[in-house]
Image: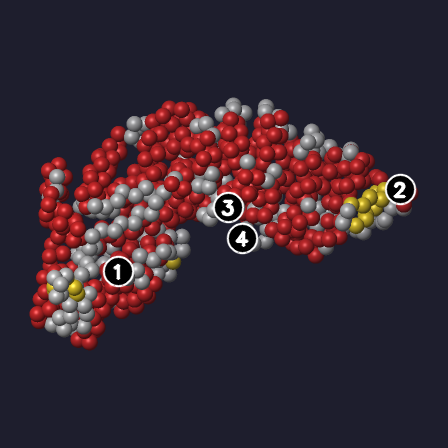
Amino acid sequence: MPGPSSQNKKKRKTPSTSSAVASSASGAGTFTIPEGLFADIDDGATWQATVEMLCRHFELPDLTTRHGLKKVHAHFDRLYSRLDSAFVTAEKRGIERAMGGIVGIWSKMCADAILRDKLFQKGLLSRIMPILNIDSTRLMGLNALALVTHHGGVHARTEIAKKNLQLIQLMRAHPDDAKVMELVTVTISHATGAVLALDETPDPRVVKAVNVRDVMQTTMENIRKPIASHYMIDHAISLFINSTQHCPKECAAAPGLLNLLVALLRSSNLGVRCQALCGIIRYTASESQFDYQNFDPQRFIAMFQRGGVPPHLSEILVDYGMERAEITMTIRASVDYQKAMMRAAQDRNLLSLGETLAGLIQRTEYSIAEGGFQAEDARGRLEIMDVGLPFKMWTDSLPCCARELRKRGLPGDLDAADVLDLKFFIMRQRVRDAIDLAERALARNPELTYAYYALSMGAEHERGLRAVKKGLKCKKVTPFLRMNMLWRAIEHAGDMGTTTLATAREGEGKHTEGVAFLMSAWEDAKTFTAEAPPDNRHMMGILDWYILLTLAIKGPELSTNLSELAAAQRKINSAAEFMGMLGLAINKTQTRLARMLILKLYSKASEEWGPFVQHFDEMNASGGEALKPLSSSQADDDLAAWLENMQLDDDDDDEHGRHPCTHPKISTSNVALYRCSWCSNPSAVLKKCGGCGKTRYCDGVCQKKHWSDHKRDCKKA
């Protein structure tokens, strides 16, 4: 291993001035370089031997261990001054191997984040870039850039990304050098990803400096070359995916790029398919809209009374069951709501009104509408009147009735009161108050289904998903609440799955967690589309998710004309007609735009890129060698092994020992490890049963509810 061991760390005698050369660098201090050092380096047979010689001479600790890097921290300024002075002297005298060896030592130090930042502040990049133009040191410089960008650091990666144009020019100057093409692509992928793989909009000036358009076009040209390695193509795909959200125009301008991402949905590797799906969804972000609906039940009833339901849509509802249709439920709830208010104006019984309203709230979404008791004024105009109740506007009846129910306190009154208050908070868009109340209600009664639904309204996907999964397991779940909780579960799990898979590149566990989310969303989407009323306002959005998830999960099992999805596409058409009839807008959501784009390009993309994807899969299936960087010589192999080797003292081995962009072989068979044994909620932070150590739960609530089913197996274990 480079770096002297303890027995080799004897202090060297300082050479006399007659046998040494004085060298200084601006800001680096002065250090005396022995003449014999450069002579020995010139005789070095390999890069590894050169680096080892330099490490021994500069009395460097073992750079492959955390302990060694801590010693560099303690003496950083002195060690850097020596190395930089030696680099400047070697550069002046044209001793290329010494320059490359010192760059190799610096790049090794970059495994430590603090050292990396210090080296970049000292100008490490200005030392690396010149050696890329020297034949003998080019690969050392490129290896250094790839290693530095591998180990991360937004600042370091961003600074390297600004050199993209120079790296592209280097690649173009050596079009037949597979190693140069590979290392440049790896470096650009890592560095550009730090700039573009963000949720927030990156600095436009930095994006411009990154030269995304040239990067995309050149990389697209290179992946088609026969010399392109699996390692290089894998990083190229990661580059494309990271660029889709913030640079959609540049991606669209690169010939074949979008078709490639769509074609990758037919890869035999589930991880690759999921990554491609994430890239396509992100590509639609700039043109997408929020799926906000403003539904007026009174307007709908008036429209329905005028024209009714078109015959072909009526047939669909009759086949499903007109009594269970959204239209029927909404009209009945609206009529019952008005009757309840009129009765309350007569009998002043807020307890009876509260019980009725709590039941209506759990029957349909738009059961409670704004309104009031009206009468004509002296001028014949309608105005809201006071009929002697503690409210004028009907929605204000909800907290009034809730207070009366809590005062009486009979069994079921507290549940009904919580439902009324939760609905009131949701209608007033007081989401935080709704979540706080839902948590208190569930602490009192873990079987209150509506509280789980309200809890899912929060912005935190993980919390919302856990809530609806538990709610779906409650003993009393109305059809309305069941469909709405499935809808929330699909939205939460789908978003979490795509987000996780778009950013998870550091090991199989994170990828599998993302796949577990997608599998959960897919299973719930199948249930929703099979059970929900055809006129459900969420049907079209869930069908979007269902098609996208089916493409990612089924992959090459689907035909190139997607005949398996024909029924789903027909349902989308009818769902669009129902939305038009209900007066609902069909917004351009990300999932909708992604679904439309994929269906438009799928057949052509499969034909254009099918052989490429098959070749990529074959290389992936070949195992370890295909996943490793190329080597142009044994010397390069030795150097690469040393640069990558880290014997860390903590749990960060994966970060440094595994390439972050390599797609592991993932299957749907191991996602059960990420699902709660009671409610099937997918999560990476489940708790194991203390008895058997096998079953997993979200928390003690799920474990308690599952105990009657699990106790026999648990005791056996």
User: Relative to residue 164, is residue 698 depicted above or below?
Assistant: below
User: Relative to residue 156, is residue 173 depicted above or below?
Assistant: above
What amino acid is at disc 1? Met
Check disc 1 and report its element: helix, strand or loop.
helix
Dot 3 or dot 2, earlier in sequence: 2
Dot 2 or dot 1, earlier in sequence: 2
Q: Which quadrant of the figure contains the N terminus?
A: top right
Mark 4, other Cα within 10 Å: few <14 / some 14–19 / many ≥20: few
Mark 2, other Cα within 10 Å: few <14 / some 14–19 / many ≥20: few
User: Which residue matches tag 3?
Assistant: 202
Check disc 2 and report its element: helix, strand or loop.
helix
Mark 3, other Cα within 10 Å: few <14 / some 14–19 / many ≥20: some
| Distance between the alpha carbons at the discs numbered 3 and 4 | 31 Å
Disc 2 to disc 4: CB gap under 8 Å: no
Dot 4 or dot 1, earlier in sequence: 1
Residue 651 is labelled as: 4
Residue in view at x 64 percent, y 31 percent: 634
Q: Which quadrant of the figure contains the C terminus?
A: bottom left
* Nearest to viewer (mark 2 / mark 1): 1
* Nearest to viewer (mark 2 / mark 4): 2
Q: Position of residue 431 (x, y in %)?
A: 32, 61
What amino acid is at disc 4? Asp
